[in-house]
């Protein structure tokens, strides 16, 4: 009788435990590390944004709720008192009117004039490269140098009055920057002159993407410059014109204080005071830092609302 020896059943061999300090799934860990690594490159930019953009913006809203007589004085929290005082401040009312007039008159003139100049440059006339270089002249002048040029232009014996006398209009001569009825016009003339040329060069760079053959074909079909400008160039550049409009809107709203400060200091009287200059004047000349920041908050709100409106006005329909 034979004896059958039972076959031993194979037992499962346990997998070796991962070494200490080594992840159980190295491939997945590497994938997670690769997905997180790009965030490290954005960290410096994020810190810069938080420190120098978000931080000052939050401080702006906080300081507008304080009574702060000066940069080294003690701040006192007063809530919305600064905003209540603005309602009865006649200088603030005058600044609002002057700012609205500057925006309504200068921004359309700059954008429309720059668009027409850009169309002319896009046709590449003889000497167009030299014209573009000349148009950058305002950028090369610092704000004090620009102010000195226009002080001479609008002086009682300056260029404007000399031009009027040459053509027999001596009765129209006046001290343009010292006359309340003309000082604001002089300020707006400086804003337009210093802005229109750079905007034209920016728009011309966009129009260069339009093939010149398209303009030539339209000319053969009998289209004049006006028709070609608004039927061909405008649809192509509409969204970029919106960008230029936003830049000019922000510059007029926030940065025109330098022109007012160097030419008239808000005078004569309060004839040329605008909101951006009033922020500077109250903060540094009248030691009303908290009050000036309340005006800055209103400027910020107006700037954001204006950007949203301009963006919706100029967005493409396709």
Image: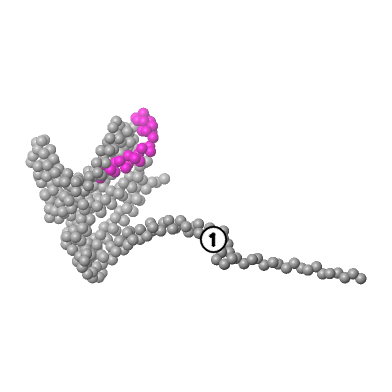
Q: Quadrant of the C terminus?
A: top left
In depth, the one of 206 and 184 nearer the eye is: 206
Tell me the colour scheme of the image.
one colour
**Does residue 282 show up magenta in the picture?**
no
**Does residue 213 show up magenta in the picture?**
yes
For image coordinates 54% across by 61% down, the residue present is 29
Taking the view exactly as shown, the residue that stands out farthest to the top is 220
Taking the view exactly as shown, the residue that stands out farthest to the front is 20
Secondary structure of the residue carrying tag 1 is helix
Q: Position of residue 124 (x, y in %)?
A: 32, 33
**Other-residue count near label 1 (Cα within 10 Å), few / some / many at <14 / 14–19 / ≥20:** few
Position of 221 relative to 303 (above/below)? above
In which quarter of the view is residue 91 placed? bottom left
Q: 6 left or right of 285?
A: right
Q: Position of residue 207 (x, y in %)?
A: 35, 39
Q: Position of residue 18 (x, y in %)?
A: 60, 65
In depth, the one of 282 and 123 nearer the eye is: 282
Q: Which residues are magenta?
A: 195-222
For image coordinates 73% across by 68% down, the residue present is 11
According to the picture, the residue beneath numbered tag 1 turns out to be 29
In which quarter of the view is residue 218 placed? top left
Position of 196 relative to 43 (above/below)? above
For image coordinates 64% across by 66% down, the residue present is 16
């Amino acid at each position: 009788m034979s004896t059958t020896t039972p076959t031993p059943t194979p037992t499962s061999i346990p997998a070796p435990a991962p070494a200490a300090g080594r992840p159980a799934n190295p491939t997945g860990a590497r994938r997670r590390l690769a997905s997180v690594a790009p965030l490290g490159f954005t960290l410096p930019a994020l810190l810069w944004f938080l420190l120098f953009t978000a931080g000052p913006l939050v401080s702006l809203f906080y300081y507008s709720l304080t009574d702060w007589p000066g940069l080294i004085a003690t701040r006192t929290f007063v809530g919305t008192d600064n905003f209540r005082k603005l309602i009865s401040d006649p200088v603030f009312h005058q600044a609002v009117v002057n700012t609205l007039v500057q925006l309504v008159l200068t921004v359309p003139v700059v954008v429309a004039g720059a668009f027409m100049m850009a169309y002319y440059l896009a046709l590449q006339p003889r000497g167009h490269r030299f014209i573009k270089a000349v148009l950058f002249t305002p950028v090369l002048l610092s704000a004090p140098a620009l102010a000195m040029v226009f002080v001479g232009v609008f002086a009682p014996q300056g260029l404007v009055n000399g031009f009027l006398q040459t053509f027999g209009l001596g009765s129209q001569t006046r001290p343009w920057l010292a006359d309340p009825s003309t000082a604001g016009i002089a300020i707006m003339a400086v804003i337009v002159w210093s802005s229109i040329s750079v905007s034209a060069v920016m728009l011309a760079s966009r129009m260069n993407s339009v093939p010149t053959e398209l303009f030539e074909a339209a000319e053969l079909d009998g289209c004049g410059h006006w028709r070609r400008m608004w039927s061909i160039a405008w649809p192509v550049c509409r969204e970029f014109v919106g960008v230029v409009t936003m830049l000019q809107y922000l510059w007029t709203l926030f940065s025109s204080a330098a022109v007012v400060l160097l030419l008239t200091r808000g005078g004569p009287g309060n004839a040329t005071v605008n909101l951006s200059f009033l922020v500077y004047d109250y903060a540094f000349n009248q030691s009303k830092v908290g009050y000036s920041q309340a005006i800055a908050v209103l400027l910020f709100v107006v700037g954001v609302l204006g950007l949203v409106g301009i963006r919706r006005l100029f967005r493409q329909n396709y």
